[in-house]
Image (spheres, grey):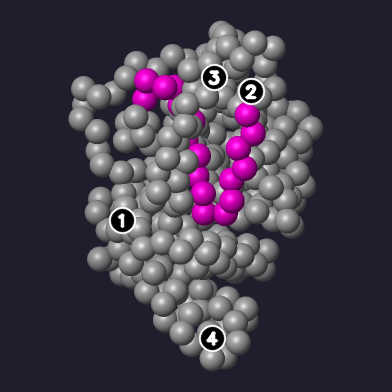
């Protein structure tokens, strides 16, 4: 284990302990601190293999008019022509959204609605795959994914990976080093499949670049968001009431990779996948 990784885990632990000290009474905090700290470290140890950092743009803005896009870090994400007002058109790449106002992110599979004050990471590394990770739902707002007539609500610590029905999770999972558990698959109309699972927030922090930056930032807003994200992890983990451990995805066999169709979206009038040159 490198010194950097050790320091990163210690930082996670210290912030977590400070959050628990504020939110719990003295007697309760003593027990909760120990058990929660062990869970954080255990989930983090799952990803001690090959270091794989997911480069992503940190997008704090809530307006995406053309003049606003020039001020946004788009090094790791591409914005399409449908970006406007409070709607970001994600055509490819990875981004962590932390907006101060409600926004929507549209992809080939539909719309991701992100409430103000939330922290949501969306990964779209290739056509035919979109993964959404809800790290924090801000101000009592919901994080949801709209696919045609379907609306899927995501609680903090829950992810959704959307793909085509010909794909298995191990093949399409764009974040194989982020630990997860309780994986479930559901087929939707128009040949769409949604995989949902609980994911380890500390594992996500370890592997998603802007999350690591937020955790170590001296900015007060970043520190507050980091505390909220880690608090969500503690609460979600305690409410889960399960002994199922987090795990990491298995690498698929090379021949298992399917051919994925690109440049399609769901026509809401008939629920079918149709070509569209604008939405990728």
Q: Residue at x 77, y 47 (%)?
A: 101
Relative to 63, residue 30 above or below: below
Query: Reading the chain from its start, which is encountered first: label 2 or label 3?
Result: 2
Residue depth check, mark 2 versus mark 3: number of the one nearer the observer: 3
Q: Quadrant of the N terminus?
A: bottom left
Residue depth check, mark 1 versus mark 2: number of the one nearer the observer: 2
Query: Reading the chain from its start, which is encountered first: label 1 or label 2?
Result: 1
Q: Residues within 10 Å of mark 1 (few under 14, many from 20)?
A: many
Q: Secondary structure at mark 1?
A: loop
* Image spot of residue 203 (x, y percent): 40, 57
Q: Residue at x 39, y 17 (%)?
A: 260
Extent of the magenta region: 150-167
Q: CA distance from mark 1 to mark 2?
A: 35 Å
Task: Give the residue number, with chain letter if any, for mark 2.
Answer: 148
| Most common SS among magenta residues | strand
Query: Reading the chain from its start, which is encountered first: label 1 or label 3?
Result: 1
């Amino acid at each position: 284990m490198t010194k950097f990784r050790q320091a990163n885990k210690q930082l996670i632990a210290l912030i977590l302990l400070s959050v628990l000290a504020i939110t719990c009474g003295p007697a309760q905090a003593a027990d909760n601190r120990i058990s929660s700290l062990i869970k954080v470290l255990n989930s983090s140890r799952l990803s001690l293999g090959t270091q794989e950092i997911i480069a992503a743009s940190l997008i704090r803005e809530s307006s995406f008019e053309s003049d606003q896009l020039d001020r946004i870090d788009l090094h790791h994400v591409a914005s399409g022509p449908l970006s406007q007002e409070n709607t970001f058109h994600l055509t490819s790449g990875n981004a962590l959204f932390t907006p101060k106002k409600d926004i929507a992110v549209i992809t080939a599979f539909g719309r991701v609605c992100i409430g103000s004050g939330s922290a949501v990471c969306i990964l779209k590394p290739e056509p035919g795959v979109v993964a959404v990770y809800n790290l924090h739902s801000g101000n009592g707002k919901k994080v949801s994914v709209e696919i045609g007539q379907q609306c899927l609500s995501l609680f903090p610590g829950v992810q959704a990976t959307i793909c085509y029905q010909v794909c298995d999770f191990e093949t399409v999972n764009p974040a194989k080093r982020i630990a997860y558990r309780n994986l479930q698959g559901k087929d939707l109309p128009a040949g769409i499949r949604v995989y949902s699972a609980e994911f380890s927030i500390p594992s996500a922090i370890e592997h998603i670049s802007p999350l690591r930056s937020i955790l170590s930032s001296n900015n007060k807003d970043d520190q507050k968001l980091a505390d909220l994200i880690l608090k969500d992890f503690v609460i979600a983990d305690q409410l889960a009431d399960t002994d199922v451990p987090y795990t990491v995805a298995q690498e698929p066999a090379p021949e298992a990779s399917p051919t994925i169709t690109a440049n399609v979206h769901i026509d809401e009038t008939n629920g079918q996948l149709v070509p569209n040159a604008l939405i990728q």
